[in-house]
Image: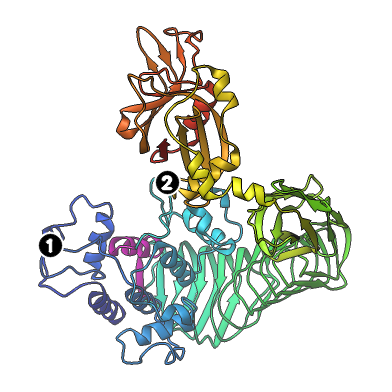
Amino acid sequence: MKKRIVCLTLLLALVLGSLPAVGAFEDFSDVEGHWAVDYLRQAYADGILEGYDDGTMRPDTAITGAQMVTVLCRVLNAQQEADLSAVLSPELWYYSAAAKAVALGLISVEQAASLDAPMTRHAAFNMLAEAFQLGRSAADQTVLEDFSDAGGLTGRERAVWASMIQAGYVNGWDGTLMLESNVRRAEFIALLYRVAGRYLPAGDYVPGEGGAVLSGDLSLRGAFGENLWTDCSGTAVRLNGPQGGSLTLRSQALSTVSMANLQLDTLVLASWGAGVSLGGGSRVGTLVVGTGSGNVSASCTLDTLDLQGSGRTVSLNSRAETVYIAGDNNTVTLNGSQGRVVITGSGNTVTCSGAVEILELGGKHNTVGGYGRADKAVISSVTNTLNLTVTELDDQRDYGITGASAAITGLPELLPPGEALTATVEFTDLPAGKAAQAVWYVDGAEVSRTDFITGEAVPGLSYTFKYTQDMALTATVGFAVEYTTAEGEAQRVTAPDAAVALENYDQEWYDKYSEEAVLKKVTTGYKGNYTTQWAIDNDYTDEEKTIFVNAKGYSSDTQYLIWASIATQHINIFEGSQGNWTLIRSGLMASGAAGTPTPVGVWKTTYKQTGWYTASYTVAPVVRFKGGGYAMHSRLYYPGTHTLSDPSIGFPVSHGCLRLYDEDIQWIYDNVPTNTTVVVF
C-alpha cells in the first residue's frame, strides 16, 4: 500500500476508533443488519475505519466537529493554516486541523471555537459540500419540497442541499432531512464513500475504477467517466485532451497550469495560486468557479458558468447559455453575447460588453454595467444598480413604505365613562398591496397589533380604560404601521400622537361598584320565581361580574374562566388571567333542582363529548367538570331528534348538570380547553 494510504489509515484509526488486533469484520457485534453495513465493511477493509477493543464498531456514535475536520483536512491533504490562537489553544490535539479547515474554507473562525460538540447533519453536510465543492446553482430545488424541515436551510444552502440530494449523497428520513440530528460515525463513512470512494496518489489513478481524490501533481489525458478531485498538495496541473467526467481542482499552491482540448462534463476551479485560462479548443458542459484564488479566463465552449466562490475575478470570452453568479464580491466580465445571467450573490461587479438575453438581478449590492444591453432584465433588490441598456425591464424592487405618512382620526372630544375609545387612521402616499402590521398605542403602551394589507381597510383602535377614582383625565393615542421588505429591511411609519380627554364616573358609581359593594351584593343560592323572565331581569351588570371574579382572585390553567351564577342562573365566560379577567360572553343556564343541586365550589373542566344519546333524551354537546361527575350541556331533546323535550332554562331544574342554550354550550365545546376553571357560586 502506498505511503499516502498508510498515513491516512493511521490518522483515521486514531480519530475514529482504537487499534485492536486485526479480526474479521463479521466479528464486530454491532454491525450485522446495520443500514450502512456495506460502507462499514469497505471502510474496514480499506483501513479507514477501525473498531474498538470491546468488539464493537459503534456506528451510531455521534462524531464531533474536531474529528470531522481532522479527517476531511487529511483526506484533502490540506497544506495551509489560519491563525486561530485568539479562539483556540495551540495545545489542543485538533488545533492544526481546525486551522487548516479555516484556511480551506470548511468552517469559520467562530465555528472553530466549538468543534468539541457533536456535529449536526446541517453543519456536517455543509462542511462536506464545501470540502468537495458539491453545490450547483442549477440544482432542482423542488426536491426539497419532500422534506418538512427544509425551511431551515438558507437561500445558498438550498441549492447546495438540492445538489447533494440529486447526486445521491444525502438522504432524508420519514419526510425530513433531520437537520438538527447528530451525525453518526456510519453516516460520515457513508458520505465519504458516496462522494469519493478512493484516496490515492494521482499517478496511481486508473480510469473506470470509480471516483477518487488524487494527491500530488496531476497529469490527465484520455477518457474517464467518474468524479475526480485533486487534493490540496499538488502544485502543477496538466490537462491534455481529457474527456468525459467531472474534475475538481483543490490545490492550495498551484503554480503551473496547462489546459488544452478539454472535453469535460464539469470542471470545478477551486484552487489557490495560479490563474486558469481555458482556450477556444476546449468544451466544458458546466464550468464552476468555486472557493479559491487566481483569475479565471474562459474562451471555451460551455453551457453553464457557475460562479460559486467569492472574491474571484472571472472573464468569460465566449457565449454561455446560463451564467450563475451565486458568490459574493466577485468581479465578472462578460464579453460577447450571453443567454441567461442570474445573479443571486451580493457585492458583485458585472460588466457586459455584448447582448444578454435575460438578466435576473437579485441578491444585494450588485452592480451591472457596460456598453452591452439586456433584452429583458428583472431587478428585485433596491440595493442593486443597473447601468445597462435594457429593452424590457421588470422592476420588482420593494421600496416598502418609506415616504408614506399617517394621521390619527376619529377620536372623540370627550370620552364618556365606560365607553370604548375608538379611532381610525388615514394614510398619505402609502403603497398598496403590502403585508404590514397596524400597531396602536395608548399612553405609550402597545394595546393592539393586527396584520393587514395596505390599500385595504386599516384595523382601527378599540380600547377600554380601567377606571379608578384618581385616574388621569387625558390619554395619548399613538399609531404605527410596520413593514418588512422582501430583503428583510424593517420599516416603520408613525402618526403624530393625539390626545383625548376622559370623563370619569362620579362618586356614586364608585360607591356602587367598589369591590366591597360588589362582594356584598353577589351571593349564591337561587331566590327567583322559577321563570325564565326573572333570570333575564335580575342579572348582575357586566361591571359587577368582572369586579367579582377579579376581586375573588380566581385563577385558571387556561386563558378562560367560567362562572356559573346560581343566584342569577347565568353562565359567564371570561378571558385573561388572574386579576385581569374580562367578560366576553354571558347566557342563561339552568342549574340543579332543589333535590339535586349543582355543587358550589371551584372546579376544572375535564373532557368533552359530542353528546349523550339515551333512550329517554339526547343532549349535545357535553363538557364535563368536577372530575367528570358533572357537565355543561344543551337542554333536553327527544331521543335522536332536534325537538326539545324540556325547554326549561333560567331556573334550577336539572339533575345537577348545567343546561345551556345550544349556541352557548357549542361555543364552550369549540373554544374552552380542558383544565379551565369553573366557578359555581
Residue occupied by mark 2: 556
Percent position of residue 629, x then y: 30, 28
Percent position of residue 287, x then y: 61, 67
* CA separation in Å, label 2 and label 1: 64 Å
Tell me how many marks there are.
2
Direction from residue 338 to residue 70 in the image, left or right? left
- Which of the colour schemes (rainbow, by chain, secondary structure, one colour) is used? rainbow
* Circle 1 residues within 10 Å: few <14, some 14–19, many ≥20: few
Assess whether residue 189 is covered by the magenta stretch.
yes
Inspect this view and state whether residue 127 appears.
Answer: yes
Residues in magenta?
183-201
Among numbered discs 2 and 1, the one appearing first in the sequence: 1
* Circle 2 residues within 10 Å: few <14, some 14–19, many ≥20: some
Question: Is disc 2 in contact with disc 1, using a CB cutoff of under 8 Å?
Answer: no
Report the front residue among 242 and 319. Answer: 319
Inspect this view and state whether residue 216 appears.
Answer: no
Task: Kindly identify the residue that appears in the image at 42 percent across and 40 percent down.
Answer: 676
Report the front residue among 300 and 672. Answer: 672
Report the front residue among 57 and 84. Answer: 84
Q: Amino acid at mark 1?
A: Ala
Residue occupied by mark 1: 24
Q: Quadrant of the N terminus?
A: bottom left
Residue 264's image quarter? Answer: bottom right
Direction from residue 87 to residue 242 in the image, left or right? right
Assess whether residue 556 is covered by the magenta stretch.
no
Task: Kindly identify the residue that appears in the image at 59 percent across and 86 percent down.
Answer: 274
Percent position of residue 418, x then y: 69, 46
Q: Amino acid at mark 2?
A: Ser
Describe the element under mark 2 as helix, strand or loop: loop
Direction from residue 434 to residue 519 in the image, left or right? left
Task: Kindly identify the residue that appears in the image at 59 percent across and 61 percent down.
Answer: 155
Describe the element under mark 1 as helix, strand or loop: loop
